[in-house]
Amino acid sequence: MLIYCPKCKTGYEIEAEVVPEQGRNLRCAVCKKVFKCMPEDLIDGSKLRTAEFTEEEKLHLDEKGHLQDEINIEAAVSEASEASVDSQEENWEEDVSEAKKTLDDLASENQYVKDIFQRLSVETENLFQADKEEPQRKKLLFRIRKALGIVNIKHILYYVYALLIFLVLFLYYARYEVVRTFPKMASVYNMLNIEAVVAGEGLEFQNVVRHEFEDDYVPKIEIKGFIANKMNVNIEIPKIKIELLDKDGKVIQSEIFDSVIPLVTAKAKIPFSHIVSRPSPLSKYIYLTFINPPLNKN
C-alpha cells in the first residue's frame, strides 16, 4: 500500500498492518513534514509513486514545488500538535519518575519510622521486663520518692534546705531539752549568746524562814533555809535572787547574791543565809529564784 505526503506528494510504500485504526504519525523524508496516517489514507500501490497536485494546490507551491500557506499552516499545527504530544509524553515520563522517586522516599521514610517503632517496642518491652524483675521494696521506695517530689536533684536540694531550717528552729525552741539530754551543748549555745540552761534546774528551796532585827539601829531581815538537790548528779548553785513583795505581790526591793557553798552533791542539801539591810517597811512576802550567770559575749 502507498501513502503520500500531503505537502510534497512524495509517496511511500507501507504495510497496511502497521497502521492501526486510530492512525499513526509519519514524517516525510523529503520535506520533513509530520502527518497523521489513517488506514483509509492508504491507496493501491499500483498507482504512481508521486501524486499530481490539483489546480488549486499548484497555486500554493513554493520554489521547491512544495505546498505552502494553508497547507503549511496545517503542517505547523500538526507539528505543534506532535510536539505537544511529545512534550506531554516527556512530562508524563517526568511525572512518573518523580512519583516513583516520591514513592521510594516514602517507602524509605516508612521503613525508618517502622524501625523507630520497632526499637521503641523493644525498649518498652525491656522496661516492662525490668519493672517485673525489680524488687518490691525498691518499687515502694520509688513511689514514695515520686509522691514526695524528690525524684530530681533540684527537689532534693529544696528538701535539704527545708530540713536544715527545721533543724535550726528545733535546736532553738527545744534548746532546754537539748541541753538536758546533751549537757555539752550548753557551751555551744553560750557561744551563740543563746540562753539554753534553766537556772537552778533540779534544785529547790526548803524550810525558808525570815527573821527581822536591828543592828546599830539599822533594820535588817535575815533569810535562811536549805537548797536541796533532787537530781542524781552534782549541780553547781547559780546566783540567788531575793525579791521583797508588798501585800499586792508587787516587787518593791530585790538583791542578788552567791551561795557560800557553790555546789550541791547528788540527792543532798546545803544551808544558805542572806541578810537584807534596810528592807522596805511595806514588804510582806519574800520570793527566791535562781538566775543564770551572764552569757559569754566573746
Image (cartoon, rainbow, N blue to C red):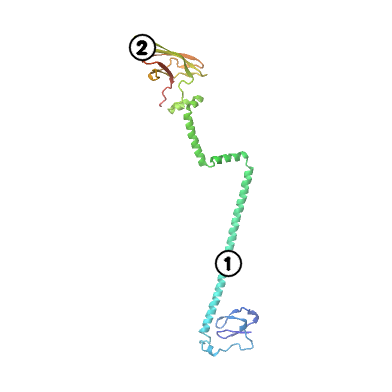
Residue receiving disc 1: 97
* Residue that sits furthest to the front in the current view: 248
Q: Position of residue 92 (x, y in %)?
A: 57, 70
Residue 270 is labelled as none
**Amino acid identity at mark 1:** Ser
Where, by quadrant of the figure, is residue 239 drawn? top left
Q: Residue at x 57, y 63 (%)?
A: 102
- Answer with mark 2 or mark 1, whichever residue precedes in sequence: 1
Amino acid type indicated by mark 2:
Pro
Tell us which disc is closer to us: 2 or 1. 2
- The answer to which of 213 and 123 lies nearer the viewer is 213
Mark number displayed over residue 219: 2
Asked if 129 appears above or below 274 in the picture, the reply is below
Q: Is residue 151 above or below residue 167?
A: below
**Extreme residue toward the bottom, this view:** 55
**In this view of the protein, which residue sits in the foreground, 74 or 191?**
74
Percent of width and height locating residue 285 = 41, 16
Q: Which element is circle 2 on?
A: strand
Question: Residue lying furthest left in this view?
Answer: 217
Query: Helix, strand or loop at disc 1?
Result: helix
Q: Nearer the viewer, residue 241 or 280?
A: 280
Residue located 55% across and 40% down the image = 147
Label 2: few (<14), some or many (≥20) within 10 Å?
some
How far across and down, in percent of the image, does residue 255 sit?
A: 39, 18
Which quadrant of the figure contains the N terminus?
Answer: bottom right
Q: Residue 271, image x and y in percent?
A: 46, 13
